[in-house]
Image: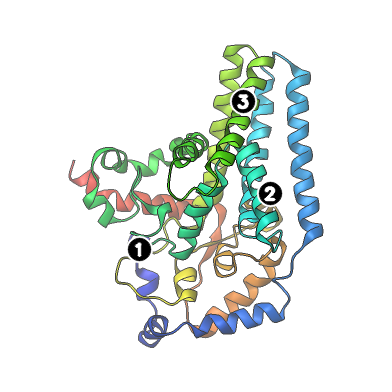
């Protein structure tokens, strides 16, 4: 997808104008989804899912204690990287009120999972993710495509300076190596955000973050020798970052970027900038339902087990409207994202 506006430009003229002029098409889709009962809470599903993740976390901690000062702990680090990834997906669902309909229990669960268990600020991430949902892939408004290190469009590449300009030349090759730092980056950004104006409960969130790292580092350096503890942290945090990146990158990377001045209604803004990932039960479990990214963006509070049925309804409705609807396999989605990163970095390579 070297031309990031190809799907938007492929709409028939009448559909482009409809997308700019009104938003009633979403109302009809919302009616169909509601009539199908897909917005109802699924308490049994989340009880079983979160219970399984809690048991896996407890098992990982128990294995850490039982194995003691051994290099076999690196296998525990691998397993806990997957568990932490699943905790991240749990925090995501709580933040979107997929689990509880009310704000207080959703927030309490989010603070527990994100801050205490993961070492990531729930309030900071909520603010960032809400802005992403409002304007996905918007060059100026979506924080997930801000050119902090990587560049996501040729326009950003032409303006890049410093680190983004250096990294952007080979960002496709560097993408997965950089993901090994994502877990640490989330924690660093969380502590940094505690002093920001958007943080509503800095003392509570800061206390929970500190508690997480006291338990995390204290436990590792108590059980393991310094060398083994550092190796554990490197494996655990590196694989955790790759897991999160592998879940979130296929959703929008390589899909059309929205520039300032482009006007699209809610339905088209969400559908055209999102990509679904096929793959069945294993992909559903690995990505926590985020492989149904189009439906998730259209209905953020929809419980995960309802997304599969919503996908069929949404795809059929988009076909009725003539709105392009994109889905592909997991490996193909990463190829598309990496191809896009390489294409938008071309001006930097040419101008070195």
The one nearer the camera, 291 or 110, is 110
Residue at 76% x, 55% y is 46
Query: What label does residue 214 carry, if any?
Result: 3
Label 2: element kind: helix
Q: Where is residue 197? Give x, y as percent.
A: 43, 48
Q: Earlier in the sequence, mark 1 or mark 3?
A: 1
The one nearer the camera, 203 or 261, is 203
Q: Where is residue 282? Give x, y as percent.
A: 69, 52
Instruction: Specify whether 180 is left or right of 155.
Output: right
Label 1: element kind: loop
Badge 1 vs badge 2, beta-carbon distance below 8 Å: no
Image quadrant holding the C terminus, namely top left
Residue at 63% x, 45% y is 111
- C-alpha span from label 1 to label 3: 44 Å
Toward the bottom, the furthest residue is 14
10 Å crowding of disc 3: few (<14), some (14-19), many (20+): few
The residue that mark 1 highlights is 4
Instruction: Specify whether 347 is left or right of 52.
Output: left
Q: Where is residue 110? Give x, y as percent.
A: 64, 49
Instruction: Specify whether 161 is left or right of 180.
Output: left
Q: Nearer the viewer, mark 1 or mark 3?
A: 3
The one nearer the camera, 132 or 107, is 107
Quarter-of-image position of residue 243? top right
- C-alpha span from label 1 to label 2: 38 Å
The residue that mark 2 highlights is 109
10 Å crowding of disc 1: few (<14), some (14-19), many (20+): some
Label 3: element kind: helix
């Amino acid at each position: 997808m070297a031309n990031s506006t190809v799907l938007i430009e492929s709409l028939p003229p009448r559909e482009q104008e409809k997308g700019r002029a009104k938003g009633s098409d979403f109302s009809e889709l919302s009616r169909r989804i509601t009539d199908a009962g897909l917005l109802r809470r699924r308490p049994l599903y989340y009880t079983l899912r979160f219970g399984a993740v809690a048991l896996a976390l407890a098992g990982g901690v128990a294995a850490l204690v039982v194995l003691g000062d051994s290099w076999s702990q690196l296998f525990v680090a691998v397993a806990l990287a997957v568990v932490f990834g699943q905790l991240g997906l749990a925090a995501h669902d709580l933040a979107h009120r997929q689990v509880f309909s009310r704000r207080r229990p959703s927030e309490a669960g989010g603070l527990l999972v994100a801050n205490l268990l993961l070492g990531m600020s729930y309030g900071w991430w909520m603010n960032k993710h809400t802005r992403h949902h409002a304007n996905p892939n918007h060059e100026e408004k979506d924080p997930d495509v801000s050119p902090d290190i990587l560049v996501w469009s040729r326009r950003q590449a032409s303006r890049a300076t410093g680190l983004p300009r250096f990294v952007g030349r080979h960002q496709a090759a560097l993408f997965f190596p950089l993901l090994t730092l994502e877990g640490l980056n989330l924690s660093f950004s969380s502590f940094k955000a505690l002093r920001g104006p958007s943080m509503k409960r800095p003392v509570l969130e800061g206390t929970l973050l500190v508690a997480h790292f006291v338990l995390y580092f204290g436990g590792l350096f108590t059980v393991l020798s310094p060398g083994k503890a550092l190796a554990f942290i490197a494996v655990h945090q590196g694989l955790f970052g790759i897991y999160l990146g592998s879940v979130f990158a296929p959703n929008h990377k390589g899909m059309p970027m929205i520039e300032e001045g482009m006007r699209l209604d809610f339905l088209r803004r969400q559908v055209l900038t999102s990509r679904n990932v096929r793959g069945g039960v294993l992909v559903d479990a690995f990505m926590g339902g985020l492989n149904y990214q189009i439906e998730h963006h259209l209905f953020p509070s929809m419980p995960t087990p309802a997304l599969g049925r919503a996908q069929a309804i949404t795809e059929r409705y988009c076909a009725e409207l003539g709105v392009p609807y994109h889905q592909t396999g997991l490996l193909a989605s990463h190829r598309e994202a990496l191809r896009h990163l390489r294409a938008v970095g071309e001006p930097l390579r040419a101008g070195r």
